Image (cartoon, helix red, strand yellow):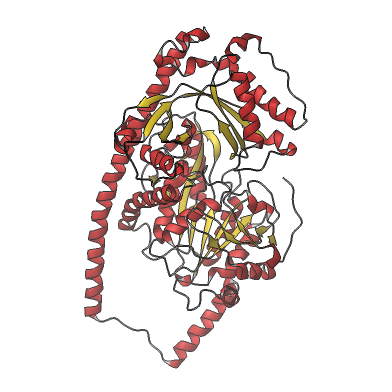
Amino acid sequence: MAILTPDKTLEPSKAYVRTPAVAGTFYPADTFILRERVDRELRYAESAVVELATERRIKANLPKALITPHAGYTFSGGTAALAYALLEDGRGEINRVVIMGPTHTVAVRGVACCNASAFGSPLGDFPVDREAEQYLLDHVPCMMVNDQTHQAEHSLEVQLPFLQQTLGTVPIVPLNVGDASPQEVGDVMRAFWDDPGTMFIITTDLSHYYPHDTARRIDDQTIGRICERLLPIRTQMACGANAVNGLLDVCIERDIKPVPLGCSTSGDSDQVSVAGQGRIPIADTNEAVVGYASFAIWDDSATHSHSSNPSQASGAAGAAGTSRASRTAAASHATAASQTGDAPHVPSPSDIATDLHEVGERIAHLHTEAHKIAVVHQERQERRKESLERGLSNIVKHTESYKKFSADPDNYSSDPATNTTNMIPYNAGEALLAIARNSIAHELGRPEQQIVTTEYTKWFNRKAATFVTLTENERLRGCVGSLVATRPLRDDVVVHALNAAFEDPRFAPVAVEELPLLRIEVSVLSKPERIDAQSREELAERLHPYSDGVILRRGKSVVTYLPRVWEQLNDPRDFISRLLLKMGLPADYWDDDIVAERYSVVSFDEPEK
């Protein structure tokens, strides 16, 4: 990754709205589905927050800072929700959020803002506090402007839907933290720390791709080091270590400690181990996983309160200064107040009794709500387990059928139970992927690789329906295919590879320099079969998550999702709602003209780049 020359000035002529880079992959792109998903995660987190509060592990007031993960919501959404659930009473109290995360695509030396005037999100655009950014550029040496490092960065973007559902579209200061010392990053935070209307979100994941039991041991050590403010946290332990170290530098100076809320891994199926409880059982100790944790930091000397003029960001920053200067000014003010003889207000016994009664009622209400949430959460987990088992059993059935029938292509249509995986031998995938890549390389005038297809010629000449999907840096780059077999398999792959690369209307044509970065997936579809369902609820019950591709037809409208979409929409109801929205219908719509069909795929994909 190239280290770019620092720029210290925001240019109004370069202002733009940053468009989401990972909507539809890390989190749902559809507004309705995304809002429902985030709200659901927050509801489930509320019961854990009540439990943490009952055990007096957390405080009742708003935190000054959070540490949250930034993976796809399927993996870390529950862990992130634990932190964001603490902000649901902060709307109107917090008028600026500084978000700081690592750089995954373009490296920088220091801390980088960008020229964006807003960050786009499916739930609404977030205004960027450019005055606050310019103040940082003018007063903090490690600050710089770098648009490229923000262009494809996901760590900040995935925080926005949670912010929207808790604080609303509050002004943000999005900062990518590159190579910088704890003191340097801490100075960025110190510039606004004493402003009561500002809070901080530091985002990091923990260990990456260790075996599950090893990952947990490493993560538990990292969580302990963060809680005890033991610098430095290494980037091998947490990808956002530089941002975390800056926060810990501030915590050490102010004598405050991060409070752990919960943790998980990508192998935990988004089930969070709440702080103070044991870890959930490991399903596969050898599975390579990514770790996640969330924390909250309270600083009673920097209590949140509603600013009289939240729009005056640079004025607030100037008043805040560094924490050392602010503490000095505050101490002088306190001394002057004591010399005037002013005394603090002492509540009367009746005031205290009224407050205690209200607190008691609130606790009783929270316990009732926590019980309801726990019941709903348990039902959800049971449904997910049931759906997953049903989907996996379906995959096993297809795999066993494949072994029996794949020897002869004439068998593939003779048994409806085997119209999927016996369509083509699994070991033909390498040749299919080479055909797809060569077709794109040929169009770009680049060398093609040698393909030996003698063994598979009879398969490649049979008619088949395929989809070709292109990704780049784990982001969708193009996806085109057909549901009905109209041409030989080889020709279908060539046509769809070219269309995915150069004709997908959602993307610009692939450039020659992108070719080495592309990851290609070829999916061979079975013949669709009708699903007998008279309602949305009945269709949801009949689907096999993680196995079924689904087609909805109504009149001349036809929409589909490949089975890979289950990774983002693992609830059948969400899956159906998104298909209906894709068709241009309301998410809760259903009538007798809608026809549902299922199909399965044999997918071949290249190794990760």
Q: In this orientation, which residue lies closer to the viewer: 530 or 61?
A: 530
Whether residue 141 is visible: no
Q: In this orientation, which residue lies closer to the viewer: 457 or 11?
A: 457
Question: Residue 460 lies in what quarter of the image?
Answer: top right
Q: Residue at x 34, y 52 (%)?
A: 43
Quarter of the N terminus within the rendering:
top right
Q: Residue at x 28, y 45 (%)?
A: 376
Q: In this orientation, which residue lies closer to the viewer: 414 or 446?
A: 414
Q: Is residue 155 above or below residue 327?
A: above
Q: Is residue 447 above or below residue 174?
A: above
Judge from the rendering whether residue 349 lies leftward or rightward of residue 91; answer left or right.
left
In the displayed orientation, state which residue is furthest to the front.
555
Q: Residue at x 47, y 79 (%)?
A: 308
Residue 438 x, y percent position in the rendering: 70, 25
Q: Is residue 268 above or below residue 602?
A: below
Q: In this orientation, which residue lies closer to the viewer: 601 or 585?
A: 585
Q: How many marks?
A: 0
Judge from the rendering whether residue 89 lies leftward or rightward of residue 75; answer left or right.
left
Whether residue 525 is visible: yes
Quarter of the C terminus within the rendering:
top right
Q: Is residue 307 above or below residue 59?
A: below
Residue 342 x, y percent position in the rendering: 40, 89
Residue 411 x, y percent position in the rendering: 47, 8
Residue 575 x, y percent position in the rendering: 41, 38
